[in-house]
Image (spheres, rainbow, N blue to C red):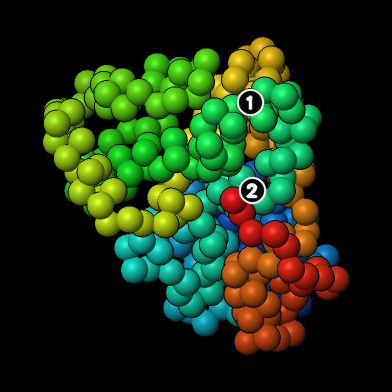
Amino acid sequence: MRDKIRAIDLVNRIRLKRGQMSKHCFVIVEGEDDSKFYGRFADASTRIELAHGKPRALEAISVLSADLFSGVVALVDADHDWLDGRGDVVNVVVTDFHDLECLLVASSALSLVLREFGIEELIAQFETAKQRTLREHLVAVGEAIGLLRLASSRRVWQLKFDGLSFERFVREKDVELNYDALLEEVRRHQGGRAEAPPTIDVMRDAVETLRSEKHDPWQVCCGHDLVEVLAIGLRRAWGKRNRAEVQPARLESMLRLAYEEVHFANTRMHACMRSWEEQNQPFRLLRQGLVNVTVQPRG
């Protein structure tokens, strides 16, 4: 049903509501999880509208902006926009990193979730053995997968990644990535496409080319991939949790709850939203009281 929702339906819904809410700010977001997250920081007069996808969100805001409709903004994931030389446009604010989940993992929310679901001794042993932090390891594994996503985007392969079986290529005992197994799983996952997916050798060469460009891994990683890997690690390497306890959807929910306001107040996204408010008075996008103080950088 959600796939059938058109951008123009969203546009018309906002136009209709404006007649009843002349002083309210309308915020278009991709989905329900985004609504839950941004709703924590929104002003009481803000009304959040679900687009059920980034393309619909961007199409809707484009129509409204062209009509000079006031007091509306879209908050969307950057995906690969920063890597491809794109970013904010009129009435659109994108995430600092690849997506919202990357923002969460880069913050102290990860430490709080690990405290709840992990075992301190196992994590310490893992970090000593790997000579890097758990977060750094997560990002290293996520970057390898993200580079394949980026290659698919740039070469217009249109590979399907949703629903991948991460257990097929991420080992539970040490949370290491088997890259050949990843490539095989991605090819298998394409199903009965009319056009055959690229060969493993072609995919590997494309990824190595992108790796040599040394992109910021936080722009490459897909946050959902990071959480999938986190879930696998918490079953054995970093904790002793069963599969049901660390379902990725549950971990993402816990990360959102553990994310502190101070981290959001220090994001580029927050600064852009405040700038939007200044340029679109009297509309209020964010509630007052988000204190901007220095926090420890990700690592």
Please give left or right for residue 209 compared with residue 111 in the image. left
| Residue in view at x 59 percent, y 33 percent | 127
| Residue in view at x 28 percent, y 36 percent | 159
* First reached walking from the N terminus: tag 2 or tag 1: 2
Q: Which percent across, then down, holds residue 251?
A: 67, 32
Query: Where does label 1 land, which residue?
Result: 125
Place residue 24 in its image quadrant. bottom right
Please give left or right for residue 184 compared with residue 297 in the image. left
| Residue in view at x 71 percent, y 71 percent | 285
Q: Which percent across, then down, holds residue 134?
A: 59, 36
Q: Is residue 186 above or below residue 112?
A: above
Place residue 124 in its image quadrant. top right
Query: Where does label 2 land, which residue?
Result: 104
Quick check: can you spot residue 136?
A: yes
Quick check: can you spot residue 54?
A: no
What kind of residue is marked 2? Leu
Please give left or right for residue 190 compared with residue 140 in the image. left
Q: Which sits in the foreground, 222 or 274?
A: 222
Report the Cα–Cα distance between label 2 and label 1: 24 Å
Mark 2 and mark 1 in contact? Answer it, CB < 8 Å: no
